Image (tube, rainbow, N blue to C red):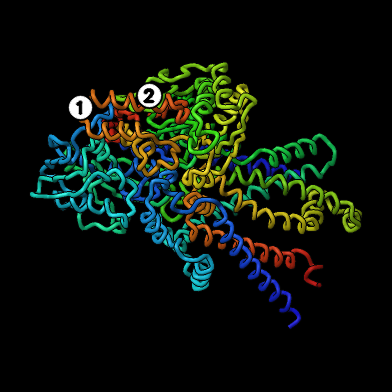
Amino acid sequence: MRRATGAVVAACAVVLAACSGGGAAPSGGAAASSLVVGATSDPDTLFPWKATQFQAVNVLEQLYGTLTELDADLEVVPGLAESWEVSEDGTTVTFTLREGVTFADGSAFDSADVKASLDRIRDEATGAVARASLESVASVEAPDPRTVVLTLTGPDAGLLAALASVNLAILPSDATEEALQATPNGTGPFTLTQRTPNQSIVLEPNPNFWGGAPKVPSLEFRVIPDETSIVAAMQSGNVSFAVFDDPLVAQSAEGSGLTVTKTPQLSYHVLQLNARRAPLDNLDVRLAIQCAIDRQQVLDTAALGEGEVTGPITSPAYRSDPAARPCPQRDLDAAKRHLAAAGHAGGLTLSTIVSQGEYATSVNEATNIQAQLAEAGITLNLEVLESGAYVDRWVAADFETAVALNGGRPDPDGMYGRYFTSTGNLNEVAGYSSPELDALFAQGKATSDPEARKAIYQEVSRHLEDNAVWVWLFTSYTYTATGPEVSGFTPMANGSLKFLRETTVGGS
Amino acid sequence: MIARHPLLRRVLEALATLLGVAVLVFVMLRAIPGDQVTASLGTEAAALTPAQRAALEAYYGLDQPLPVQFLSWLGAVATGNLGASQRTGESVLDMTASALPITLELAVLSLLIGLVLGIAAAMLSASRPNSARDAVGQAVGLAGLSVPAFLLGSALLALSSRFLGYNPNAEQFAPLTADPWLHLQQLVMPALVLGFGLAAPIMRTARSALLEVRSQDYVRTARGKGVGPRRLALRHVLPGALVPIVTMTGLQFGYLLGGAVVVEQIFSVPGIGRQVLLGIQQKEYAVVQSTVLVIALTFVLVNLGTDLLYRVIDPRVRAA
């Protein structure tokens, strides 16, 4: 028996020795001034035209260049095109390209690459996800190596902002998708040096980058699948930069001495209404729902109050006033009046689809909305679906209402034109269109004066709220956590990590 | 002939099991809503034109009828071609060749930890049933059964990072051949978590087996012959109790492969569990199907091995 006790003691001793032995040897300090970013997932593709997963976008925007870029306020600034000119009637855009830019493999960048890239993106067979952004482009010409001329079917003021997406990155004219999956070849601030699938991607600065080489000696995206484990890795000093969505994880990171910066996001939490289906085709029913929901209460109960109540448009320059709607505050009497006017004084039953697992707050939002609507006499049945099943139903517009978290874009035309114009490729999912909205979006595209555009999209916003097309709830934050040595990074509302190129670690 | 017959039957049974697993995985994967197109594009898939959608489906091989997809996959597997990941271009065989040894290593390490902790605790408990010592052992066993691996793992990682600044799992994973010392450190914490969970059922099985054997005639005879208590426990009682312990351990191997999914996720260990999980998340049919088949094969082989082990440790099975 004594020997058995001894075995236990020995086992414990081995365990302790293993832990403390390693603890004595500082293992985190090996890469002193390189920047290690903790990411929950490996990019699902390295081909920029097909990348929608944000981990993939975060890596690819370091490797590839775009004609235009966005600054910290999401205003359009020059990228590979150093300047551009829009014709009087808005149907011709002439880009002047930067000189002396090269791809990672050393080959020169010129207008032939731009033409080849844009033409291939417009070809349906390519399967490029941002093809619709170039819908207005009739032809692409490259009259000389530094000039590209886009001829448009009509004015498109949102095009310049759209061109800043890495989904419209400029690739070498002779590159194939297979080749780029294996060896990325772009004009971005970094180049790829090493990839271990599902574990790590290491980049090094591109010394020839037109904006000046980045300051860190290397940039690594290290895959640590669990967000809590990323916090642990930051505490032990192995990882010095990460972006979190979950407020609870951000709190634990902040509590352990890391610097955490909150950034309001363009994406928005919303209760989508399918206004093409009875009884939601009745404006009074939709207004009753709008009036019955206190958006702040949804935000407080589902997301710990971490976020801001929002109207339709979330980009800083065009932001909607959240109070500009028929029911700025919750008003149960108004809700009941609208229900009665719609002939549902006795109550009404609706269903909603909710995604489980896609994002943390979905089910809590749904149950809170359910409780609030019940007080107005509306019974909401929840269909909580696994995220794949949810996406299938959403894509097919097979729902009465949907609790959704939709991505936003810097330009309101890019953000909502595809949803709320009658020919938009997401109009079926949006469940609503009107001649007024079609006219407003057309007017917005044709107007290039910023102030005039702002007025037009304010009208769009008003129309959407007056007609209770959807019930916009709130935007949440993303949390950028950095270690003690990291400085110079600017978070962006669209989630872009563009400013990693200006980030420094320690004295580097 | 008669001696070879049961073995042959076992092999045929194993093949039938594997075929069953293959059909089940294939059908289940396709029964899950969503495909590779929606898995990679999410709600953006709604913006695809029909022609774009068709082009993507052809790219992922989803335009073939289901029986054709199944048979061409099975045919390829039979010839040793497990398919490839569309995401990374790597063949599933290569992925498995690097991931499976890591998980097996993890499984063996945790098995060792589980056996040492479990049997030691069981001998401690069984030496004086219903004493305070027994109660402590039982309580530890209950804790091991009830604390989920993700909780124990996250807590261990957080505490060691925060207070010791020690977190080998946050470094790039080191292959055994490149840096054995770091490699071992990276496996210790996950193995402890899995081993702790494993120790509990082993302890409970071993305790009751030990108590039963202790009351048997041959033990009393040995004690009567004047065998000392330590020799009695290790040479007479423990061997008699080994069969249920080995059975339990073999069964728990399946738990190890399953539990590895969670633990590998928390500790960023690139094993077979993460390979399956990633495959499911990305709806990479070939990756999931082939990897699950490999796991099933491993499980079948381990069970076969357990059966053979009975013959070694129990003379009665050898005689039968």
Q: Residue at x 25, y 45 (%)?
A: A169
A417 up-or-down from B83: above or below:
above
Q: Quadrant of the N terminus of chain A?
A: top right
Residue for point 73% across, 58% down: B247
Q: Position of residue A209 (x, y in %)?
A: 18, 41
CB atoms of marks 2 and 1 within 8 Å = no
Answer few, some or many: residues within 10 Å of disc 1's Cα (few below 14, many 20 plus, some between 14 and 19): few
- Tag 1's secondary structure? loop
Question: Which residue occupies the foreground of this view, A409 or B263?
Answer: A409
Position of residue A276 measured from the top left corner of the image (x, y, whole percent)? 48, 38
Q: What chain is tagged by disc 1?
A: A
Q: Residue at x 72, y 57 (%)?
A: B246
- Mark 2 closeness class: few <14, some 14–19, many ≥20 residues within 10 Å: some
* Among the 4 quarters of the image, the one containing residue A350: top right
Q: CA distance from mark 2 to mark 1?
A: 20 Å
Q: Quadrant of residue B132?
A: top right
Say whether residue B163 is left or right of residue A178: right
Secondary structure found at label 2 = helix
Amino acid type, residue under disc 1 in the picture: Asp
Q: Is residue A474 above or below residue B73?
A: above
Instruction: Please determine whether, in this image, residue A58 is positioned above or below residue B25.
Output: above
The one nearer the camera, B121 or A428, is A428
Q: Which residue is mark 1?
A: A449
- Residue A237 visible in the displayed image: yes
Q: Are marks 2 and 1 on the same chain?
A: yes
Which numbered marker is on residue A462? Answer: 2
Q: How many marks?
A: 2
The one of B33 and B128 positioned closer to us in this rendering: B33
Q: Earlier in the sequence, mark 2 or mark 1?
A: 1
Residue B308 as seen in the image, left or right of residue B156: right
- Disc 2 or disc 1, which is closer to the eye? 2
Q: Which mark is residue A39?
A: none
